[in-house]
Image (cartoon, grey):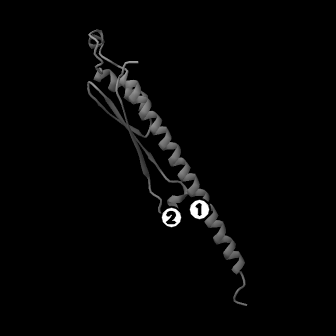
Amino acid sequence: MGERGYGSVLALALLFGGVLLVGLASDVSRMVVTWREVSHLAHTAAETAAGWVDPGALYRGELVVDTEAAEAAAVGIASGPDRSVEVDANSEEVCVTVEQQVSPGITRLVGGASKTMAVTACAAPRRG
């Protein structure tokens, strides 16, 4: 007689577990999508920025990065809402670091915390 209602409690627990699993899958997929986006932006910004070379040096046959133009180009490409961009450019190479926060959805109920997706990409001008 003490087992009355046990099935309802078990069904409710299974339903809650199922919702948490769907939420976890959703949060993980959001993190993967954000990481891919940040990675693409960092690589594209670094490669584009490395293409900004000093014209005077180019006429002398040297490939020298125009650091000011490269930094402006990289920030212009990779910046966006809730995203930070850091550019480290010198005469030979441009490195771009892009960071973006990803907040959990339903897994926040069980202690899920925000994660920072950060990717650094470097590129250098080359003849070709």
- The local secondary structure at tag 1 comes to helix
| Looking at the image, residue 33 lies above or below residue 22 | above
Residue on which the image places disc 2: 110
- Where residue 34 appears, as percent x and y from the top left, is 49, 43
Residue 115, x across and y down, in percent: 43, 51
Which amino acid does the dot numbered 1 rest on?
Answer: Leu
In this rendering, position of residue 105 left or right of residue 69? right
Q: Position of residue 90 (x, y in %)?
A: 26, 27
Pick the residue in front: 25 or 9: 25
- Where's the C terminus, which quadrant? top left
| Image quadrant where residue 38 sits | top left
Left or right of residue 110, residue 79 in this image: left
User: Where residue 77 appears, x then y in whole percent?
Assistant: 43, 28
Q: Which of the 4 quarters of the picture holds residue 71?
A: top left
Q: In the image, 125: left or right of 30? A: left
Q: Earlier in the sequence, mark 2 or mark 1?
A: 1
Q: Identify the element where label 2 is drawn.
A: helix
